Image (cartoon, coloured by chain):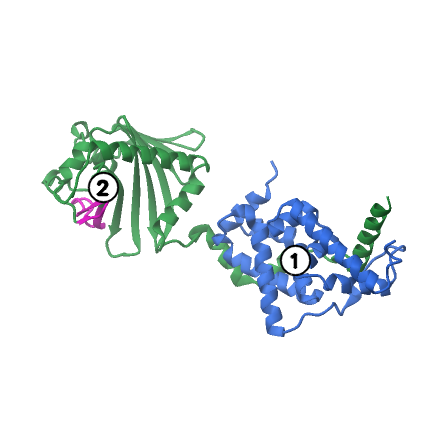
Amino acid sequence: MEKSEYDWVCEACSGNIEAFGCLYKSYYKSMTAIAYSLAGRFDVAEDIAQETFAIACQDIARLSHPDKFAAWLAGICRNTARKFLRAKKEQRLPDDFSYFQSDDETAIDSETQGVVRQAVWSLPKKYREAVILRYYDGLSYEQIAKINDLTVQGVNGRILRAKKKIVLYLKKRGLHHEIR
Amino acid sequence: MKSDENQDRLDKMLVDSLGTHQGEPDFERFCQNHISEVKALKSNRFTKNKAEDDFWGLHFNSLKHMFRPIQIPIGICLLAVFLVIFNVWNFSPSGAGIAWAEVGRKMQTVQDVQFYEFDFRNGAPTDFIKGNYSRGKIERLNSDGSRSIDDGRKCVFTTSDGVFLRETGSEFKNMTDVENMNNLFEVLTKGILQYRQGQLDEQKPTEIADDFLIYHFSPSAAFEPLLESIFITVGKNSLLPVQMKLFYKNNPQRYDIYFFEYSAG
């Protein structure tokens, strides 16, 4: 029988490094996405994600609720990102767009992409994180709910409100023709 | 319709603008770059929840791994019911004058005892045994899954699947005349205490707490070279041992703890 995430967490708590490796592979992208939503730079986000897993590796034995592993890990990630930002005193838009790749020929033009990114970065942190987890990491509402320790309805509400703010932002910048 | 189209259009704009994560997570590289953290995780195999300062936390964390989650609250409830029953039957206001002989007499009324043995080295548990005494037989489940059943005459060892491993004489055979031993605790403690030299019966508690009495004993002659001292905690009202702690000579970091639970009747 295939092991559940709960089993992996319990085994990792008991010192099984392979189990921790499975959790690492499951959540690495999501932690990078959370860090990216706060730090605004992909290379920094990767460093923060690494640091997050290093802390989790040391402290996982203290995790009292294995079923809340995702939310616990996300909490470590946010704190690590905040510490990083305090140290660097910076939070800015991504300056290395080479990470943003799309092979889709019908993709919107790069100027519009830039404005959409600005719109995303103008959102409050919790909305921005939900949008990035959904559209950058491609997580389902259920997965986002697990990471944020929210209900699916709660996530749905956050993303809906975020999208309304994005539409408003785009309209103010004259991109109302993009959203008919 | 228009609203749905707008939603799809906005979703696509967000996906195009934010892109997708490139590259796969490389756990091997993570392990190479975080050797001390990986070592710390691996060490959890033996020192999970370093709870040497939190004795009860350690006890319950161990139980969590020994039993299914539902069994722990049921066990606690049974224990609570048991204590309530003995509270009613055996009320004792002070406890200072209760000699160990009283505890021995109470033990004679007990037919079934579950016990859990934890071996500590440097403040961390290294091994545990779960056991059960019922009507003259002691059954042990070792941490490696093997079992043994000792009926006072012979001791049979089997694997976790019940496959016969070996048979030896009873662990109690050379201790004293087990046929005449009517104190269950004597059987359980396997001759650790000095039963036949009058040490036990007159012994009074050395510490008195609200709910517990603690008796301090010296080991029997057979165990004197090995053990430093023995502390047995007894429920003040039940007059039944709930915990026994054995300290080893020349090694203050090494001790064994036994917990006892009783089934009425």
Chain for numbered disc 2: B
Q: Report which colour depicts chain B.
A: green
Residue range of the region highlighted in magenta in the rendering: B207-231
Residue B223 on the magenta span:
yes
**Image position of A12 with respect to A113: above or below:** above
For marks 2 and 1, give the one nearer the viewer.
1
Q: Which residue is mark 1?
A: A126
Name the image quarter holding the N terminus of chain A.
Answer: top right
Say which element carries label 2.
strand
Q: Residue A42 location in percent, x, y? A: 71, 64
In x, y percent, where is residue B121?
34, 53
Name the amino acid type tagged 2.
Answer: Val
**Residue at the (55%, 57%) spot, across then down:** A56
- Distance between mark 2 and mark 1 Cα atoms: 55 Å
Residue B211 placement, left or right of A179: left
| Chain whose colour in the figure is blue | A
Quarter where residue B72 is shown = top left
